[in-house]
């Protein structure tokens, strides 16, 4: 081989090595930038805080809350749970009082996105389970649209927490083949449900947000075949120190709940399974009857 050809080969080799070198430097620069950019955008945790009692919080939620940087929380998150938030954390209350929206859903979405874009880890605290009647789908859509990572931390939903606190099973193979979670927020003047399928005796119904609609619920169930003496249980502030229960029947619960001044948050459970509710529940119902 001629010397001139050898030099040409050597030059080509060197130039290829240089190219590869600069390519890998570019690649590593890009990777460093990507990871830095990722670090600059925070993540959102959609956390269920359970029905109120501190010790019904999951360990995962507890750990995240203890290290919180930014917390956006709802009305039904228990005070004891809020006390776990470090002093250093930024807090945003976005709770909605009954019938009025203090902060719009759009604003809640914006707030989560703004904070995550500041590089913060955002905890979005909700009562119960974040995926049950808690507008989680809208919040996930907003986060996806902004390209922000999110995680769900499940919580004990009011149905499970309240049923346990009242001492009843939601299903019992002798009387309830299914349990149905129903939202009872008012649309127009009447609840839009398929009452014929709800008024079946072999199931348990759990109505969320139903206190205002109690007259509508009880009338519709009776109009569709459930007997007037069918058992119904109201649980106010379930699992909290101030929990109150009322075991009654479809034809008398509206009157009794009014007399006892039941307030939100209250859960309504309808079905045979409520008959085994704890004695203190029965005592309250009896004292109301006697009054
Ligand atoms: C907007 S929904 C939120 C439900 C929540 N994501 C969950 O999984 O429990 C609010 C309704 O849940 C019910 N609820 C929540 N916590 C409750 C509690 N501690 N006692 C009674 N009802 C409760 C009430 O019916 C209340 O109106």
Image (cartoon, rainbow, N blue to C red):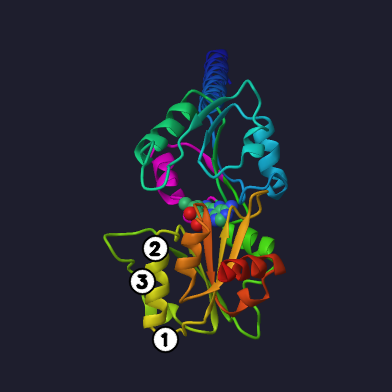
Residue found at x 50% / y 40%: 74
**Kind of element beneath mark 2:** loop
Report x, y in % for residue 280: 69, 65
Residue labelled with disc 1: 225
Residue labelled with disc 3: 193
Please report the bounds of the magenta region as a residue range: 130-151
Residue found at x 50% / y 66%: 256
Residue found at x 43% / y 44%: 139
Which badge, 2 or 1, is on the more N-terminal residue? 2
Q: CA distance from mark 3 to mark 1?
A: 15 Å
Quadrant including the N terminus: top right
The residue lying toward the viewer, choosing from 243 and 110, is 243
CB at mark 2 closer than 8 A to ligand 1?
Answer: no
Report x, y in % for residue 265: 52, 52
Question: Is residue 131 among what the camera can see?
Answer: no
Report x, y in % for residue 40: 52, 24
CB at mark 1 closer than 8 A to ligand 1?
Answer: no
Which badge, 3 or 1, is on the more N-terminal residue? 3
Circle 1 Cα neighbour tier, 10 Å, few/some/many (<14 / 14–19 / ≥20): some
């Amino acid at each position: 081989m001629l010397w001139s050809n050898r030099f040409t080969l050597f030059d080509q080799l060197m130039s290829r090595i240089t190219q590869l070198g600069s390519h890998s430097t570019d690649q590593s620069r890009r990777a460093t930038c990507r990871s830095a950019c990722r670090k600059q955008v925070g993540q959102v945790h959609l956390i269920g805080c359970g029905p109120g009692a501190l010790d019904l919080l999951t360990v995962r939620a507890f750990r995240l809350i203890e290290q919180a940087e930014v917390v956006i929380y709802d009305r039904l998150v228990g005070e004891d749970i809020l006390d776990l938030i470090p002093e250093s954390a930024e807090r945003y209350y976005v709770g909605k009082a009954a019938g009025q929206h203090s902060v719009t859903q759009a604003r809640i979405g914006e707030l989560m996105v703004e904070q995550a874009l500041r590089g913060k880890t955002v905890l979005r605290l909700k009562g119960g389970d974040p995926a049950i009647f808690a507008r989680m789908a809208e919040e996930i859509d907003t986060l996806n649209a902004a390209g922000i990572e999110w995680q769900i931390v499940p919580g004990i939903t009011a149905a499970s927490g309240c049923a346990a606190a009242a001492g009843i099973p939601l299903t019992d193979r002798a009387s309830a083949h299914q349990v149905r979670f129903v939202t009872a927020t008012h649309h127009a003047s009447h609840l839009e449900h398929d009452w014929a399928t709800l008024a079946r005796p072999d199931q348990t119904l759990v109505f969320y947000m139903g206190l205002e609609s109690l007259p509508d619920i009880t009338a519709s169930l009776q109009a569709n075949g459930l007997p007037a003496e069918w058992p119904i249980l109201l649980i106010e502030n379930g699992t909290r120190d101030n929990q109150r229960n009322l075991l009654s029947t479809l034809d008398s619960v509206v009157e009794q709940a009014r007399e006892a001044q039941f307030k939100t948050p209250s859960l309504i459970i309808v079905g045979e399974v409520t008959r085994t509710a704890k004695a203190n529940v029965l005592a309250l119902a009896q004292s109301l009857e006697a009054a």
